[in-house]
């Protein structure tokens, strides 16, 4: 089985659900608590995620977050450079959970994606 990396927020029920599903299925999962300063993503890591993300880069932003509104952001049509800049400055705006199988990256919403991940062991 390949090693999977889960960008995880332990305070998010969807993220906890995804981690539980992956571990229960027997997958080796590297957990990265990206909101902790010690585990924060570098600009290069954020760019790599954005480039490999299945979907549009703005999908990686939590649009219903209070900070998103405070910043007056409108992510529609943003390119990778703009999304990367926002996420490096405001890591809490990163959607979660995010599964990285080393090739592709997928956001774990809706929750049904966690079941797919657990079954296949990769982003599908």
Image: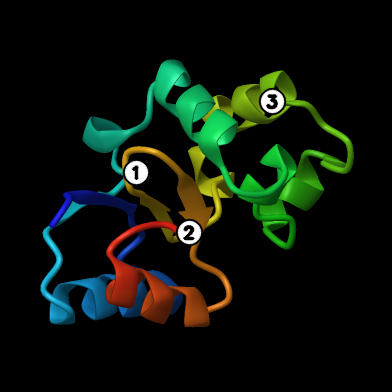
Graded by Cα atoms within 10 Å as few (under 14), some (14 to 19) or many (20 or more), the crowding at tag 1 reads some
- Front residue of this view, candidates 56 and 14: 56
What secondary structure is marked by label 3? Answer: helix
Mark 2 or mark 3: name the one nearer the start of the chain. 3
Who comes first in sequence, dot 1 or dot 2? 1
Q: Is residue 75 left or right of residue 63?
A: right
Q: Which residue is mark 2?
A: 96
64 shown above or below 73:
below
Q: Are marks 1 and 2 in contact (CB under 8 Å)?
A: yes
- The CA span between labels 1 and 2 is 10 Å
Label 1 residue SS: loop
Q: Nearer the viewer, mark 1 or mark 3?
A: 3
Q: Are marks 1 and 3 in contact (CB under 8 Å)?
A: no
- Whichever of labels 1 and 3 marks the residue nearer the N terminus, that label is 1
Q: Which residue is denoted by mark 1 in the rendering? A: 34
Whole-percent x, y for residue 5 in the image: 26, 48
Q: Which residue is mark 3?
A: 80
Q: Position of residue 101 (x, y in %)?
A: 33, 47
Task: Give the Cα distance between marks 2 and 3.
Answer: 18 Å
Say if 97 sits above or below 17 in the image: above
Quadrant in the picture for residue 74: top right
Left/right of residue 107 with respect to residue 61 in the rendered view: left
Q: Residue at x 24, y 52 (%)?
A: 4
Q: Position of residue 14 (x, y in %)?
A: 44, 76
Q: Is residue 70 above or below residue 14?
A: above
Quarter of the picture holding the N terminus: bottom left
Q: Evaluate whether residue 29 shows in this view.
A: yes
Residue drawn 28% across the image and 49% down it: 33
């Amino acid at each position: 089985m390949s090693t999977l990396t889960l960008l995880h927020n332990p305070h998010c029920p969807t993220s906890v659900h995804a981690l539980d599903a992956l571990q229960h299925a027997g997958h080796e999962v590297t957990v990265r608590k990206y909101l902790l300063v010690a585990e924060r993503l570098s600009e290069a890591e954020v760019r790599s995620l954005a480039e490999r993300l299945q979907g549009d880069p703005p999908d990686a932003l939590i649009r219903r977050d209070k900070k998103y509104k405070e910043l007056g952001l409108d992510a529609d049509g943003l390119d990778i450079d703009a999304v990367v800049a926002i996420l490096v400055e405001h890591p809490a705006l990163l959607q979660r959970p995010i599964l990285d199988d080393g090739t592709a990256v997928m956001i774990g919403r809706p929750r049904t994606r966690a079941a797919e991940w657990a079954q296949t062991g990769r982003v599908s």
